[in-house]
Image (tube, rainbow, N blue to C red):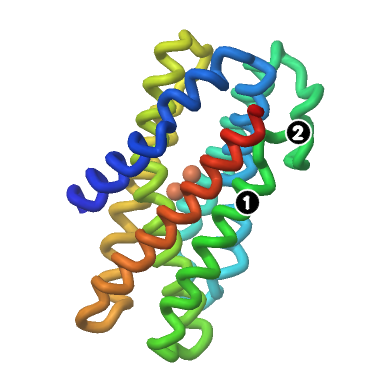
């Protein structure tokens, strides 16, 4: 897992995320919309979880994961309002005009989800096992990215003297990543590592797509 994280951290800083964040954080109105995009992505992640998880496999850790993702969404929404001067004007909803590349942010999650679905096709799993394994694989790829992205964001927040921190979100995501790493080992057949590698590769493509959409939205 350590080497996966190192690779994702290298990719994320190579994508110029730190500099991009510095540009956005310098303009509170833009920063509030970016935080609202992150809030939307946490919300869409939680919604995907609700849809993917069958009652037969839902357990205490699964409920906790869901609760925490909704909690991340709410915490980020409140941070967006704080950065926006205490008002939700212009960031009230998750619509395109209230977010920064928000549609592309949601597209990132859809892309990872669909890509993982494609990778798992060859295993010919019956439902509801297929959607359960898809949840674990796509969550794994997304949690690896969260562990690469949020530390870079946290550093940018500190540089800018922002009035909030994402450290507690980061520690939840690390626990989720550990859970998904354990779960995927149970679900994939022997030689399943190649599916994980492929999932991480396609996630990287989706992440770059989102970052370039954020960059474009500043032009
Ligand atoms: Fe989260
Ligand atoms: Fe998570």
Q: How dense is the environment of label 2, judged by Cα within 10 Å: few (below 14), some, or many (20 and up)? A: many
- Position of residue 92 relative to residue 3, above or below, is above
Quadrant placement of the C terminus: top right
**37 left or right, relative to 4:** right
Count of labels in the image: 2
Image coordinates of residue 12 in percent, x first then y, are 37, 40
> Is 120 or 18 nearer to us in this picture?
18
| Residue 80, numbered circle | none
Determine if residue 171 is in view: no
Q: Earlier in the sequence, mark 2 or mark 1?
A: 2
Name the one closer to the observer, 170 or 53.
Answer: 170
Residue 102 falls left or right of residue 97: left
Mark 2–mark 1 Cα distance, whole angstroms, equals 14 Å
Q: Quadrant of residue 139?
A: bottom left
Seen in the picture, residue 18 relative to 5 is either above or below; the reply is above
Coordinates of residue 101 in the picture (x, y in percent):
65, 40
The residue tagged 2 is 98
Q: Position of residue 200 (x, y in %)?
A: 35, 60
In the current view of this chain or complex, which residue is farthest to the front?
A: 219
Which element is circle 2 on?
Answer: helix
Q: x%, y% of residue 203?
A: 43, 57
The residue indicated by pointer 1 is 106
Tell me the residue at 73%/41% (across/down).
Answer: 94
- The local crowd at label 1, few if under 14, some if 14 to 19, many if 20 or more residues have their Cα within 10 Å, is some
């Amino acid at each position: 897992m350590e080497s996966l994280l190192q690779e994702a951290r290298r990719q994320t800083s190579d994508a110029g995320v730190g500099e991009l964040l510095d540009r956005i954080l310098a303009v509170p109105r833009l920063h509030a919309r970016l935080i609202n995009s992150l809030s939307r992505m946490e919300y869409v992640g939680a919604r995907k979880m609700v849809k993917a998880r069958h009652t037969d496999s839902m357990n205490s850790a699964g409920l906790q994961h869901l609760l925490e993702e909704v909690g991340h969404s709410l915490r980020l929404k409140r941070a967006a309002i704080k950065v926006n001067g205490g008002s939700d004007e212009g960031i009230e909803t998750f619509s395109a005009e209230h977010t920064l590349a928000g549609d592309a942010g949601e597209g990132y999650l859809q892309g990872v989800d669909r890509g993982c679905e494609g990778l798992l096709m060859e295993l010919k799993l019956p439902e509801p096992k297929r959607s359960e394994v898809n949840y674990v694989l796509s969550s794994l790829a997304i949690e690896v990215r969260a562990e690469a992205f949020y530390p870079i964001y946290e550093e940018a927040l500190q540089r800018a003297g922002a009035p909030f921190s994402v450290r507690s979100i980061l520690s939840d995501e690390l626990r989720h990543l550990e859970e998904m790493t354990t779960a995927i080992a149970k679900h994939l057949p022997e030689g399943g590592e190649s599916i994980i590698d492929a999932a991480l590769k396609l996630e990287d493509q989706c992440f770059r797509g989102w970052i370039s959409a954020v960059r474009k939205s500043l032009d």
